[in-house]
Each structure stands twice: as C-alpha cells, then as structure tokens.
Image: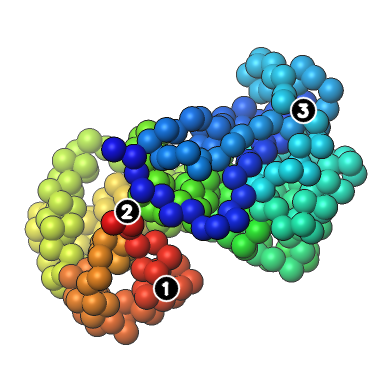
Amino acid sequence: MPVTVRIMPNTPHLVVALAYDGLCTFEFGVAVEVFGLPRPELGPDWYRFAVAALDPGPLRAMGGVRLLADGGLELLEAAGTIVIPGWRGAREPVPAILTEALRRAHARGARILSICSGAFVLAAAGLLNGRRATTHWRYAETLGDLYPAIRVAPDVLYVDEGNILTSAGSAAGIDLCLHLVRRDFGPEAANSVARRLVVQPHREGGQAQFIETPVPTAREGARLGPLLDHLRERLEEEHTLASMAERAGMSLRTFLRRFNALTGRTPGEWLLAERLARARALLESGETAVEEVATRAGFGSAATLRHHFRQRLGISPATYRARFRRSV
C-alpha cells in the first residue's frame, strides 16, 4: 500500500546534483540514494533527478570511480533543488561559472543544499552571508576565518535557512536530505526512505557527540542496556541521577562516566532527546492535546514542552503538529 504523501503545491520536484572532477563519492551517493532512486511506494510525485557536470567528462570521483553526467550546468536552470555534494577542499577555488549559476538559481527561488565541505561552494557564491551555516567540524573554523560574514554553527548536524541548507560531515548529509523529504512529503515518506536506508529518520544532537568518543565496551552496553529500556518505557516518570545509578548497580561517578561512554551524552541530555522523540511521535500521530503530550512524554507541563521545542526545534508543538501530522 503506497505511503500517503502531502507535498505542498508548487514544491519543486527536479533535484539536480552537482558533479565535478575529484567528486566526493559518498556525499554524491547520499544525494542519489535519497532523491535519485525510484520509489513507487511513495506515489507518482516523487522527485525527478539529474546530474550536472561542472567539468568535461568523464569525471573522476574519489575511490577510482569515473562518472558521466546527464548534462552541464545548464541543468541548474531547471532545478527546483540543487545538491552540492562536498568540494575539492576548503581552500580550493570555486569557478566563477559555478558561483554565478548558483546565484541565478537562488534568485529565482531554487533550494540549494550542501553536504560537508560543499558549504565552501555556497560561501564562495555569497549565499551564506548573514546566515547560519555548518560544515564538517574539521572545517568549521576555516569556514569562519575565510568568510566572516557567515554565522558558523559548528555543533549541529544541519542548518535549514529556508532555501539555503547546509549539513555537517558526510553522514549528516543523510540527516539533511531526510529533513528535506520530511518538509516536502511529510514524516511517513521520510520514515519510509529511512527504513530503506536502515537509518534513524531523525537524529538528535550535534557533531560534538561524534568527536573523539570512545567506542563503548560490550560490558557497558550489557549493564546499561536494561536501564535504557526501563527509562524509555517510563519516560513520563521522574528519574534522578541517584535512582538511575542505583538501578544500574553503579556508584554515581562510575555511572556518569560509563553512561557518557555508551551514549555520548549525559543522562539528562539523553532523557531530553528521548522525551522530545516521544512528543514528536504523539504530535505527528493524532489530535492528543498538548498538555497530555507533555505529560506522556515526561515534560510535566505544556509550558516546559513548549520551551524545549522552541529551544531544540525552533518551533512550537502546535506548529510542529500542523507541519508534520501524518495523513490519514
């Protein structure tokens, strides 16, 4: 049974990915996987996809791959969404013919998104000036130094500035592309694509949780796994650090160290992310009153729920439900 989609009228359907000599293969593959594969289960309005070459082909991609594109930069003129899958390097010059084409596309209303170092292409085109933007944590400082007019956000997975979107490291491109599917087609479609990819449809947290975080040992997972299951089943209840440490059979100090090693977060941060995930699911699935959503997700009051929604998601629970409620 096809998933019911709710793409808004006039939403652009043609996605064009840029290809260039020295192409970042993984980032390009993300764009192809999300936007370029046929998905008959999502109905006839799914994206069309094309590849626009910056350089004469065949193009070399990382890993010894060679690529023939569908056309040149003229394809950007018809694109509703343009994907910049990485770039040759943070300090590698961006040809004027490309920056001019991107400025024209932006002026007529096309959406442009970058993955990882692709933010440097948007920056060179002047499209990030005065905006928040992100890139891989290794390049964030360089992006800010080279382009001081950009408000660099080094600790997020992606930034949505309407028609300009940027993502962090390579895998964060998946998060951003799924976010765009969610914007266009609703949560059911994004969840369907995520299931095909075998990834989470939405990740909480920022880049910091992936930097120099030790791989958890099997012992820690075995001891804390039952605790995490217990907490997920009882998010509406109050959980103190002392009660969680006691259930895990650890001293408070040991518990905090091993919890962070396993999850990359403090217990409070982990609980907040789980509660937000439950609240989103409740808001997406029906007409449950906001006060009841707050209670069932463990926030205690609608005011607290609204505070965390605005702080983490930038919108109110009511706006979130109106935007992402699942179609019947």
Q: Position of residue 23 (x, y in %)?
A: 70, 28
Is the residue under label 1 in contact with that under label 3 (CB below 8 Å)? no
- Looking at the image, which residue is at 36% across and 79% down? 306
**Left of 28 or right of it: where is 228?**
left
The kind of residue tagged 1 is Thr
Q: Residue at x 23, y 77 (%)?
A: 289
The amino acid beneath tag 2 is Asn
Nearest to the eye among marks 3 and 2: give it: 3
Q: Position of residue 53 (x, y in %)?
A: 77, 29
Mark 1 secondary-structure assignment = helix
Q: Residue 215: x and y, percent?
A: 35, 39
Q: Nearer the viewer, mark 1 or mark 2?
A: 1
Q: Say which residue label 2 marks.
A: 260
Residue ID for mark 3: 71
* Image point (73%, 63%), residue name: 150
Does 169 sit left or right of 100 as displayed?
Answer: left
Q: Secondary structure at mark 3?
A: loop
Rendering quarter of residue 281: bottom left
Q: Amino acid at mark 3?
A: Gly
Seen at 50% across and 40% down, the residue is: 46
Q: Quadrant of residue 273?
A: bottom left
Task: Please tell me which of labels 3 and 1 falls first in the chain.
Answer: 3
Q: How far is the residue under mark 3 from the one under mark 2? A: 48 Å
Q: Give left or right: position of 326 versus 223.
A: right
How many numbered badges does the structure rendering display? 3
Q: Is residue 207 shown to the viewer in this render? A: no
